[in-house]
Image (spheres, coloured by chain):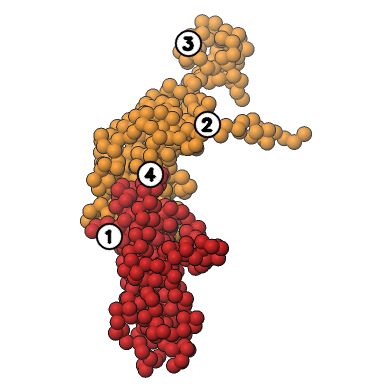
Chain colours: A red, B orange
Amino acid sequence: MTLLAVERMKLFTTRSPWWCALIALATTIGFSALIVGNSDDGVFSATVASTQFGYSFGMAVVMVLAALAVTTEYRFGTIRTTFQAVPNRAAALAAKTTVVALLALVIGELSAFGSWGLANLLKPDAPLALDSAADWINVAGVGPVYAFAAVIAVAVGILLRHSAGAIALLMIYALAVEDLIRLIPGVGDDIYKWLPFNVANKFLTGDGASNLGRNTDAGAPMSTAALSQGGSLTYFAVFAIVLLIISIGVARKRDA
Amino acid sequence: MIEARGLTKRYGNTLAVDDLSFDVAPGEVTGFLGPNGAGKSTTMRMILGLDNPTSGQVTIGGKKYTDLKDPLRTVGALLDAKWVHPNRSARAHLAWMAKSNHIPARRVDEVLETVGLTSVANKRAGGFSLGMSQRLGIAAALLGDPEVLLFDEPVNGLDPEGILWIRKFMHRLADEGRTVFVSSHLLSEMALTATNLVVIGKGKLISQSSTKEFVARASENTVKVRSPQLDRLRELLPADSATDTDDGILVSGLDSAKIGELAAGNGIVLHELSPQTGSLEQAFMQITGDSVEYHTGLESEARHALEPAE
């Protein structure tokens, strides 16, 4: 508990988490407002799923926040002060990851329900009620997805130690590489089914029930992952935690 | 208090620290002396468990650093004053450190008061001058009221006022009975601060002794002689023992009593007969002369540069 309190103090006594949180909320909710504001009653009808189309932008910002939380420690040498104060590096880094993931969870829930709430204000007559499990997962699930995305970002930050390198890798991977892999002839689509962010998207959108049959070509593409929604979240979580364990293992052996 | 045994650190092909063994006695200021690149900082990082030794080990009061419970309460260290997040305030920086080692929060204000940073405690540390950063680093080292204190090049880059402050501070810490291990490449600084010296060069131990002993052993004792009959005296001295100076000669290898007796025995008038004590710099150069990592014939280069252009 002490270590969690320490990492919370460290995180909130710098400015970047606050800015990142604000930007994550603004981009996600803003994008949702655009989508929903431009919806009509036909092909582009507002649905619960359409209120969450912008979640990946907020996730990108949350991953920047998470990566910075650890790479700035390397950048400014405070990681050494941390390991001096807490020689058990695994405990210190696990505590940091937990705090960052919890913040990501909160940002995720705020942005998801903020987007959904704003959509309700913009289109009071649209079918936006959360009246099925699929609807609830699509909105409330954004928090856990942000949290595990943050774990991935912290792990990459620990491994690379450089802000620019870690952020570039994370952004390029999450926003481009997964889609590009689909272009590999033959096996591309099969590999893509198992790539973590595609799988995370499957957890949120499932088989499209929360999108009410809205034309998928008119919005974010459906995930091609083969797992169930529960299986998808588990897969994404396991991927994040394995990556974290590897990075902590490296950090323990490495000279600080 | 601090015991290093066969401490070795290898980076690729470079041996940064080579089979280093030394002891740092409790309740005294021990200087850790060596030229730049001798392995001082690496050794300090190994003491703190930040770098893993390739072989050998170092213990503090018989325990490895990583086995200490709430280590800031046993060992305080200032390795680099810039290891602070620039957007975090001085107070916030100390507050999280205190929290992590179960140190009461009021201790933060106490150490800020001790180093004289109370008035800027809530300012962002990135805006601090080097001297202020150094004070903050010392405050962090003192936070857990530790018995052992490690400082790496604490006076580096400081103005005279800052240097004086740090020097007084070291003495105060030792007077309080703490073990202080302070590294420097500035010998004059060590002569004023440390009672014991651990001297290294190229990662190897060169000597461990008291500062006095080190200077006495290392500095070549010379005697300055002025006399109207220098030519006669020179003939009586062993070959190559006399060096000309502006107004006399410097004799090495003989003490003043011998030279005086020699002069009296031969009826030579002496105007001056004064033993010269070597400076710590001389002693240091003499002992570490071969162990400077980046020896580039600097001296001859400098001499060349100073020669008037022909």
* Disc 1 residue crowd, few under 14, some 14–19, many 20+, Cα 10 Å: many
- Nearest the viewer among B236 and B60 is B60
Q: Which of the 4 quarters of the picture holds residue B89?
A: bottom left
* Disc 2 residue crowd, few under 14, some 14–19, many 20+, Cα 10 Å: some
Q: Are marks 3 and 4 in contact (CB under 8 Å)?
A: no
Q: Are marks 3 and 1 on the same chain?
A: no
Q: Could you tell me which residue is drawn at 33 percent across and 78 percent down? A: A134
**Looking at the rendered structure, which numbered label has been put on residue B292?**
2
Q: Which numbered disc, 3 or 1, marks the residue closer to the eye?
A: 1
The amino acid sitting under disc 2 is Val
Q: Are marks 2 and 4 on the same chain?
A: no
* Cα–Cα span, label 3 and label 4: 62 Å
* Cα–Cα span, label 2 and label 4: 31 Å
**Looking at the rendered structure, which numbered label has been put on residue A4?**
1
Dot 3: element: helix
Along the polypeptide, which appears first: circle 2 or circle 3? 3
Residue B27 in view of the camera? no
The amino acid sitting under disc 3 is Lys
Q: Which residue is mark 4?
A: A253
Q: Is residue A221 above or below residue B185?
A: below
- Nearest the viewer among B254 and A194 is A194
Residue B288 in view of the camera? yes
Chain letter of the residue beneath label 2 in the structure image: B
Q: Looking at the picture, how far across and down is residue A117, in whole percent? A: 35, 85
Q: Are marks 3 and 4 on the same chain?
A: no
* Cα–Cα span, label 2 and label 3: 36 Å
Q: Is residue A7 left or right of residue A171?
A: left
